[in-house]
Image (spheres, grey):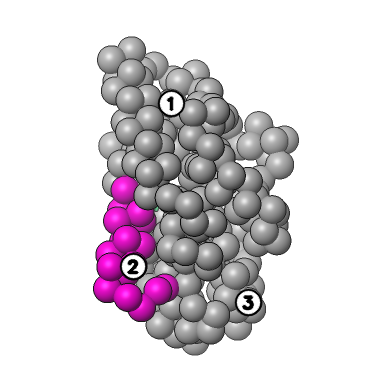
Amino acid sequence: MLKFYYNPISVNTLRVWVALLEKQVPFEPILVTLDGDQFETDFTAVNPLQRIPVIVDNGFRIIESLAILDYLEAKYPTRSLMPSQPEDVAKVRIVEMVAVNELQPATVPLTRSLVGLDIDDQKLDAAKKRIISVMLFYEDLLGTHSYFIGEEITLADIVAGTIVPSLPMFGFSFDLYPRLKAWSERLLMRESWQQITPQPEVMEAALPIVRKILEQRL
Ligand SMILES: N[C@@H](CCC(=O)N[C@@H](CS)C(=O)NCC(=O)O)C(=O)O
C-alpha cells in the first residue's frame, strides 16, 4: 500500500492528504512528529532532505508536494484533479505557484509572530500586504464559479484551499472577499477537508514544535 509520511499541521502535507482522499487512493499514514524525528537516520533514509510530505508507492519514493500531486494525477487519473484545456492547465499552475511562492512564504513572518519569535515590523507589514494582494488576485480569478476551474475541484483548489482557510488565524477577514469566503466555506464542507483540518487544540499543542522549526530554519 502507498505510504504517506505526514503531519496534520504541515501545510505541505495537507495538500497531498486532500488529493489522496479526493482520489480515494488507499494509503498507510506514517506520522512524522517533526519534533526532531525528521533528522533521525530512519527518516533521513526516506528523505535525505529531512522534510515531509513523502510518499512511497510500490517502492518508488517521491518528495516535494507538487511533484507528489503530479505523480498522483498521472498514476491515479480517476477521479481527475487536472483540467485538459490549455488555458485551464495554465490557470491551475498559476494558482498553485502563487500559493506556494507568494502566499505560503508570506505566512512565515506572521507565524513567527504567532509563536512569539522576533520579527521586524516592516517584514510583518510587507507580508500582510502580500497576502492581501493574493486574496484580491484569487477573488478575481474565482469569478462566478464554484471552484477555480468551473464547477469541479482541481489541484488549484487543493493547493490554495489548504492555506487560504487558515488566514483568519492570522487576523485576516474574508468580509471584503465574498467569493473567496464562499469558496473557502465550500471546501471546508467537503469530507476530505473535514478529515484533514486540524482541531484548534491540535494547532495549539503544535505551537512549540512550529516555533522550534522556525528557529532552526536557515
Ligand atoms: N517544498 C517542500 C517543502 C516541505 C517542507 O518544508 N515541509 C516541512 C513541513 S510543512 C518540513 O518537513 N519541515 C521540517 C523541518 O523544517 O525540519 C514541499 O512542498 O514538499
User: Is the residue 87 above or below the residue 164 in the image?
Assistant: below
Query: Contact (CB < 8 A) between labels 1 and 3?
Result: no
> Which residue is located at x 37 percent, y 49 percent?
141
The numbered mark, 1 or 2, whose residue comes first in the sequence reads: 2
Left/right placement of residue 204 relative to residue 109 reads right
Foreground mark, 2 or 3, reads: 2
Q: Is 90 covered by the magenta stretch?
A: yes
Q: Name the residue under label 3.
A: 24
Q: What SS does tag 1 mark? A: helix
Give the magenta part as a residue range: 82-98
Q: What SS does tag 2 mark? A: helix
> Which residue is located at x 48 percent, y 84 percent?
77
The numbered mark, 2 or 3, whose residue comes first in the sequence reads: 3
The numbered mark, 1 or 3, whose residue comes first in the sequence reads: 3
Q: Could you say where residue 171 lies in the image, as x and y percent from the top left? A: 53, 23
- Viewer-nearest residue: 10 or 45: 10
Q: What SS does tag 3 mark? A: loop
Give the CA distance from mark 1 to mark 3. Answer: 34 Å
Q: Mark 1 points at which residue?
A: 110
> Which residue is located at x 60 percent, y 53 percent?
187
Left/right placement of residue 216 relative to residue 169 reads left
The secondary structure making up most of the magenta span is: helix
- Viewer-nearest residue: 140 or 73: 140
Mark number displayed over residue 88: 2
- Callout 3 amino acid: Gln
Q: Is 1 covered by the magenta stretch?
A: no
- Callout 2 amino acid: Asp
